[in-house]
Image (cartoon, rainbow, N blue to C red):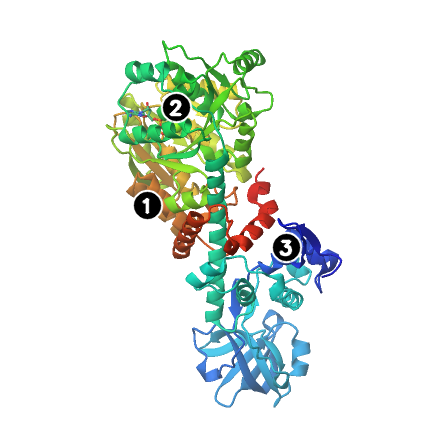
Amino acid sequence: MGPHASFIFVKNDFLTVQILHTSIEYLKGVGPVKADLLKKEAGIFVYEDLLTYYPYRHIDRTRITRIKDLNHETEFALIDAHVISAEVVGVKRARRLVVMVTDGEGTMEMVWFQGIYYVEKAMRPGDNYQFFGKVSFFMDKPQMTHPEFQKASEGATKDYLEPVYPSTEKLKARYLGGRQIAALTEALFHQVGRNDIPENLPDSILSKYKLADRYTALRQVHFPKNMEEYEQAVRRLKFEELFLSQLRMTLLKIKRHNTSSGHVFKIVGNLFNSFFNEHLPFALTNAQKRVLKEIRKDVASGRQMNRLLQGDVGSGKTIVALLSMLIAADNGFQSCFMAPTEILARQHFESLQKLLEGMDVNVGLLTGSTSSKERKVVLEGCKDGALNIITGTHALIEDKVVFKNLGLAIIDEQHRFGVAQRARLWEKNDLPPHILIMTATPIPRTLALTAYGDLDYSIMDELPPGRTPVLTVHRSAYHRAEVMSFVRSEIEKGRQAYFIYPLIEESAKLDYEDLMKGYEEVKSFFPPPKFLISMVHGKQSADLKQTNMDRFVKGNTQIMVSTTVIEVGVNVPNATVMVIESAERFGLPQLHQLRGRVGRGSEKSYCILLSGIKLSKEAGERLSIMCQTNDGFKIAEKDLELRGPGDVEGTRQSGLLNFKLANILADKNILKVAMDAVEELVKEDPQLENESNKRLRQYLSMKRGKTVWSKIS
Ligand code: ADP
Ligand code: MG
């Protein structure tokens, strides 16, 4: 333990030195310059980070391959052979050194395009070398280009598989390529031993699931003797990742259930009942009823509710929100209803006002563009309790907004609100409000349980009756005229249509031009005054957006040309056609969200995915799944399969699913086992008080400072 090791307090008050927390700078062969790069390029700050900087593959140099045994399946091989001839052939860029070698049974060529002079000097006919490299075949004969070579007497075989690490151009330029990182890892293992890498899982779990101990696993994931050892090591480490993340979240949930006190909504009173009996325009679906029951149980329990409600697009989440807010009002509490965009916030405001007409409930709206005069009134109403329900954007979580008694916060389309932002809501009162997060971005169940394991979870898997499913088709740009005439026929029936254009941040300027071109084109097909068009995009002022939106909502325009700003929540039941331009550029959840804007009334609706003519395989699959199903959960599963979990919308920023080794899709089985293990453990020892769980508790408390919150801005 050097002077640079950092000191960490562990619960029971003695001082332990954590060599693993030593800055990487002090590892032999690193120093300040390389350390800086390792931090920036590879996220390696301390020893422990290097320990968990895992190789992506291994090279087998443990045995020598006979030349005659090389075949098209061979990737890398170690060849022991002597030189027959060495000859420079070709000119200019084809100039190369060709060395013919034999191991007695077969011959092959070793080829160099660079460093010819140096290699040629070394290769004397008759000399014996070990060559290591990637095998390729030329005219059916094996060869290696730029192999590594070593005098056979120096013995190049190793007794373990050699790790290959990811690197970057910048790292390579500073002699930190994959090979050099391997050398650092080796140096690290000279410095840290078994005692520095203590076990963190209980023995019972290790033996029950036949897992390697932690030190062995970490060592063998880098330097295994063979692939079996490697796979054992990986299984243990994946299990550890999944188990610990699941355990952390389960403990959070238990803690919240045990200790968090929340406002008690004792009664379901007049407001709820009179709305339910006299104003509700339809019967609730069974799914809506079930979810309302779950919410009612939570808010009456005395604990703080923290619930994620997942309901597919159009499943009727708004009314569930409203009914919950009426329960709050019945108990004398205020509610806020937050949406990710101004358009959506305003739309919520308007639909709530309409639904609540004739009732004694005051609704306010607060967004970034609320005028200062109105703002003053709304802020007053929040503070003195005159407002029962406040809809708005994240302007609601600003410090200036003070509530008299905020009892319930509903967050619509959660994935745009960070965890930290949610946390700010809690600070608005002595007791945190109940929290209901609603999302229409379907998340497969396994993923939801893994990513949001600290929340309670409700699902609305039923659409209100009387909807005809949206018919989705895929057309290439060749069929544009046909598509336009179809849209015209719908408009002539009195319906409305959307044209959606992609807008992706980095290329915003180009996309903006596309949108304008698109607008002109749509206009040429649908000329005024017979046809009127609204256009909405992110560069407009909130006012202009609103005016254009309103004209479309009211039916004053038949066509809406827009970017994805209308993606979430917008409700225009008379719109029956959506044309999505460059559909191949959208991700599945986004396409599904967009499509949810049509099929909201009783008329048959259509979604037309227009794409370029040449498509990547993945894009083709995306569009085809859209044509096959309207089921958001199926689409989410497919999305997960195509992109991998690290990328699924709403989880990426959270970092919650970015495991280093595990992949919750490919490692479903390990995940299942880890979840079972967590369940069993907390059933027996929910506070981790047993002696056998002591190291687990210590490990979790030490890690606490490094949780994901810091990654959320
Ligand atoms: P989302 O879950 O996507 O937010 P909304 O709450 O916007 O869905 O509801 C979509 C449409 O369905 C709205 O027009 C709403 O009035 C209607 N709706 C909601 N619940 C029902 C129901 N139980 N029966 C009939 N229509 C309903
Ligand atoms: Mg909605």
Query: Is disc 2 in contact with disc 3, using a CB cutoff of under 8 Å?
Result: no
Q: Nearer the viewer, residue 245 or 441?
A: 245
Residue 406 placed where, x, y %?
Answer: 50, 21
Relative to 480, residue 678 above or below: below
Q: Residue 303: in sight, yes or no?
A: yes
Q: Which mark is residue 44?
A: 3
Closest to the camera, between mark 2 and mark 3, is 2
Q: Quadrant of residue 192?
A: bottom right
* Mark in front: 1 vs 3: 3
The quadrant of the rendering that contains the C terminus is top right
Residue 2: x, y in percent? 74, 60
Q: Is residue 569 visible?
A: no
Q: What residue is pinned by disc 1?
A: 624
Q: Is mark 1 within 8 Å of ligand 1?
A: no
Q: Amino acid at mark 1?
A: Ser
> Which residue in the structure is indicated by mark 2?
324
Spot the residue most to the right.
3
Which image quarter holds the N terminus? bottom right
Residue 250 versus residue 322 in the image, above or below: below
Residue 387: x %, y % from top left: 48, 14
Report, in whole angstroms, how far the alpha carbon at label 1 lies from the one at label 3. 41 Å
In terms of secondary structure, where does tag 1 sit? Answer: helix
Q: Quadrant of ligand 1?
A: top left
| Badge 2 vs badge 1, beta-carbon distance below 8 Å | no
- Residue in the picture at 58% in, 82% down: 130
